[in-house]
Amino acid sequence: MGDGIGRYRGTGSKLAHWLGRRPKQADTDAPGREELLLAIAASGLPLAPAAHPVGYRCSCERIGCPTPARHPLSFAWQTQSTTDPAQVERWAQGQPQANFITATGMVHDVLDVPLEAGRAALRRLLDNGVEVGPVAESGDGRMLFFTATRGTPEDEDEWWPCELDCHPETMDEHPGLRWHCRGSYVLVPPARLPGELGVDWVRGPEHPLPDPLTLLESLTDACARHADQLGEHERNQVAWPLSR
């Protein structure tokens, strides 16, 4: 468990080399972006192209875009998402400014928490020898813990859509936490956000995906402590906008 916290320190591979370098937020044409996306796809995370920032606006040019530079380019992103290296390569070369999202609930989920809570939980998990998978930090104040998915239930009625994690009645149990599963997505590094912010790896995607339940207690406890320091309005805010 020598990874510690902070920017990911790699193992010498090409992927680890790029993960160890925090890319400049505007340097989308830097050598290795394509290789990093291909390595992410090779790790099993299905990808699809997403919008990117144009100054403080979104490339989709929608007036008042609720999630600037954070949403897929296509409404068919769930069926479009793929790990096929040829398709990822075509997207990366044909859309050099695009961010990329990964669709959750297919092979992996993501536990999305406030950055301060996430850092505290990650430190606790590593100190306790818990196997933590890939982790990313977002410049807008979130930390993303990538885990194995809950799986595909035999009974379709057993599905728990991601929106159930976002309503006010869930905030007391898991304050500030959203569980991205079926029907959701997150940005994958390297990604750019408006205001010269970005999304970067803390631990790279070559780490095996853990069972989400091995992380949930520590994340929930950290979120609860974090929520105690916030005002009522901040506590009741959802972790991620519901509108797409």
Image (cartoon, helix red, strand yellow):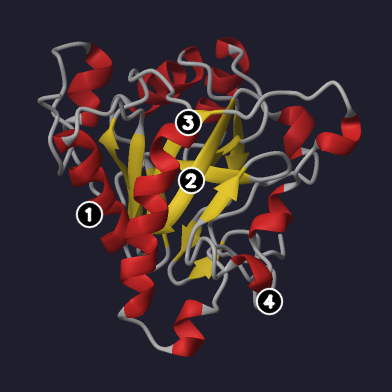
Cα distance between the residues tagged 4 and 3: 34 Å
Residue that mark 2 sits on: 111
Residue that mark 3 sits on: 147
Residue that mark 1 sits on: 120
* Res. 168 image quadrant: bottom right
Q: Badge 4: few (under 14), some or many (20 or more) residues near its Cα, within 10 Å?
A: few
Give the residue type that dot 1 points to.
Answer: Ala
Please report contact status of discs 1 and 3: CB closer than 8 Å, yes or no: no
**Sequence-first tag of 2 and 3:** 2
**Is residue 171 rendered to the left or right of residue 64?**
left
Please report contact status of discs 1 and 2: CB closer than 8 Å, yes or no: no
Cα distance between the residues tagged 1 and 2: 14 Å
For the residues carrying marks 4 and 3, which lies nearer the camera in this image?
3
**Sequence-first tag of 4 and 3:** 4
Q: Quadrant where the C terminus lies? A: bottom right
Residue 75 percent across, percent down from the top left:
79, 46
Name the one closer to the observer, 116 or 154.
154
Please report contact status of discs 4 and 3: CB closer than 8 Å, yes or no: no
Please report contact status of discs 2 and 4: CB closer than 8 Å, yes or no: no
Name the one closer to the observer, 96 or 234.
234
Residue 98 seen in the figure: no
- Dot 4 lies on which element? loop
Residue that mark 4 sits on: 63
Cα distance between the residues tagged 2 and 4: 30 Å
Please, is residue 115 above or below residue 216 in the view?
Answer: below
Give the residue type that dot 4 points to.
Answer: Ile
Please, is residue 63 above or below residue 175 in the view?
Answer: below
